[in-house]
Image (spheres, helix red, strand yellow):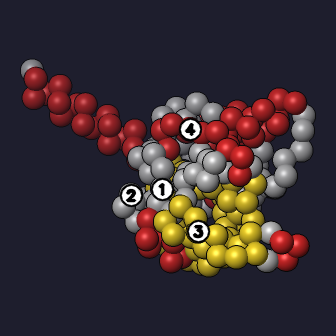
Amino acid sequence: MMEWHLKTPLSGEDVKKLEAGDIVYISGEILTARDEAHARILEFAENGEELPFSLEGAVIYHCGPLMQQTGEGKEGKPEWKVVSAGPTTSGRMSKMTPPLLEAHNVRAIIGKGGMKNVSEALKDKCVYLAYTGGCAALAAELIKEVKTVHWLDLGMPEAVWVLRVEEFGPLIVGIDSKGRDIFAEVREKAEKVFSEIKS
């Protein structure tokens, strides 16, 4: 098991060196995206439209943050402070992740609980990083700046928030770019033990 400190945007080489079980800390920009943001990203791809933000080498955080408006900045744009930013259950985005990765060079996905049937889509290009649930306050401390927000019409939790983070983690590589899925391994072991108990 290794510990890595990475800066965004991530490269293919950054993610290919990560092994399942490694510990990762991210610095730089991450973007939040939940169900509705994923659906809109895919809609843009289907229509051949350009996104208002870049997903090249991006880190997507499955998170519906709670934000507080603190005032107005340049050009009258609202300024925001993160109140809470814990991870959302990633399984909800499992079906939308393979087509999203086909359309964009996202390099890492952060969330909780693992994802099903995405290991093939992640191969050679992306990793899934597990963040412990219940760390909403800690996550908020590691977010140093709310850079901007897109698609606020979706609502605060579903909007795409662009966040500057420092040493965001610890994150565990739950699914690496070689196809190893720790969550699937645990499920298989649990099912085997359960079947042995039943028999």
Question: Can residue 1 be seen by looking at this rendering?
Answer: no
Left or right: 66 in relation to 99: left
Q: Quadrant of residue 161?
A: bottom right
Up/down of 87 relative to 44, above or below: below
State how far apart marks 2 and 3 are (Cα). Answer: 21 Å
N-term mark: 2 or 3: 3
Q: Quadrant of the C terminus?
A: top left
Q: Quadrant of the N terminus?
A: bottom left
Q: Are marks 2 and 1 in contact (CB under 8 Å)?
A: yes
Residue 158 at x, y percent in the picture:
62, 47
Left or right: 53 in relation to 59: right
Q: Quadrant of residue 154?
A: top right
Q: Residue at x 10, y 29 (%)?
A: 197
Left or right: 183 in relation to 180: left
Residue type at the position of mark 2: Gly
Q: Residue at x 79, y 77 (%)?
A: 73
Label 4's element?
helix
- Disc marking residue 133: 2
Residue type at the position of mark 3: Gln
Residue 23 at x, y percent in the picture:
47, 67
- Disc marking residue 68: 3
State how far apart marks 2 and 1 are (Cα). Answer: 6 Å
Up/down of 77 relative to 176, above or below: below
Front of the two marks 1 and 3: 3
Residue type at the position of mark 1: Pro
Which residue in the protein does label 4 denote? 93
Label 3's element?
strand
Q: Are marks 2 and 3 in contact (CB under 8 Å)?
A: no
Q: Quadrant of residue 4?
A: bottom right
Residue 172 at x, y percent in the picture:
45, 61
Q: Residue at x 62, y 43 (%)?
A: 122
